[in-house]
Image: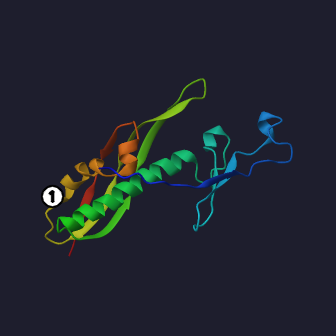
Amino acid sequence: MAKEHDYTCRVDWTGNRGEGTKTYRGYDRTWEIRTPGKPVVKCSNDPLLGGDPTLPNPEDLLLTALSACHMLWYLHLASNAGIVVHSYVDEPLATGESEPSGAGRFLRATLRPRIEVAAGADLVRADAIHHEIHKYCYIARSVNFPMSYEATYTERT
């Protein structure tokens, strides 16, 4: 039987310049994510929509969550399979679209991990693990756009 888990945070809008949302251009699209017992994360809107390009935006955070969840399950399943991972670096790519109305969505995401494994690792099994992760990862099981994987491997000598 499945168990429910609760997650919580607080999102504080920090973009009030003094007059709230009196005018569309009169406020900033910035906020802070506050999760109990964790560092504050300062965020902004997508730069395409007037946000601060130096801060994470919701799209960045979703792609990051997807990549991190995949990585953590990969490491777990690789360990269970006897595959020793020494390094895992992902540079995922997501493609989105924006409609003339302003509505947007992700069309697809490709995870592109570069994985260093111990010499002699079973690379066929190492690659097959990626296709098992969708059974477990909270984030991957929650999104409604297709995901793919383009993993590359090197062996530590």
Does residue 110 appear to the left or right of 11 in the view shown? left
Q: Residue at x 36, y 46 (%)?
A: 140
Q: Is residue 91 visible?
A: no
Q: Residue at x 39, y 36 (%)?
A: 145
The secondary element bearing badge 1 is classed as helix
Question: Relative to 79, does residue 30 appear above or below in the rendering?
Answer: above
Q: Residues within 10 Å of mark 1 (few under 14, many from 20)?
A: few
Q: How many marks?
A: 1
Q: What residue is disc 1 on?
A: 125
Residue 48: horizontal and vertical position, in percent? Answer: 61, 39
Q: Is residue 95 visible?
A: yes
**Which residue ends up furthest to the top in the rendered image?**
100
Q: Quadrant of the C terminus?
A: bottom left
Question: Relative to 51, does residue 151 appear above or below in the rendering?
Answer: below
**Which residue ends up furthest to the right in the rendered image?**
18
Q: Residue at x 79, y 47 (%)?
A: 16
Q: Which three-letter amino acid code belongs to the residue tagged 1?
A: Arg
121 or 70: nearer the viewer: 70
Residue 118: horizontal and vertical position, in percent? Answer: 20, 72
Question: Relative to 16, does residue 118 appear above or below in the rendering?
Answer: below
**Which residue ends up furthest to the bottom in the rendered image?**
157
Q: Residue 41 occupies which quadrant of the picture?
A: bottom right
Q: Residue 152 occupies which quadrant of the picture?
A: bottom left
Q: Residue 25 occupies which quadrant of the picture?
A: top right
Q: Residue at x 43, y 43 (%)?
A: 94
Does residue 129 appear to the left or right of 63 in the view shown? left
Residue 88: horizontal and vertical position, in percent? Answer: 33, 64
Colouring mode (rainbow / by chain / secondary structure / one colour): rainbow
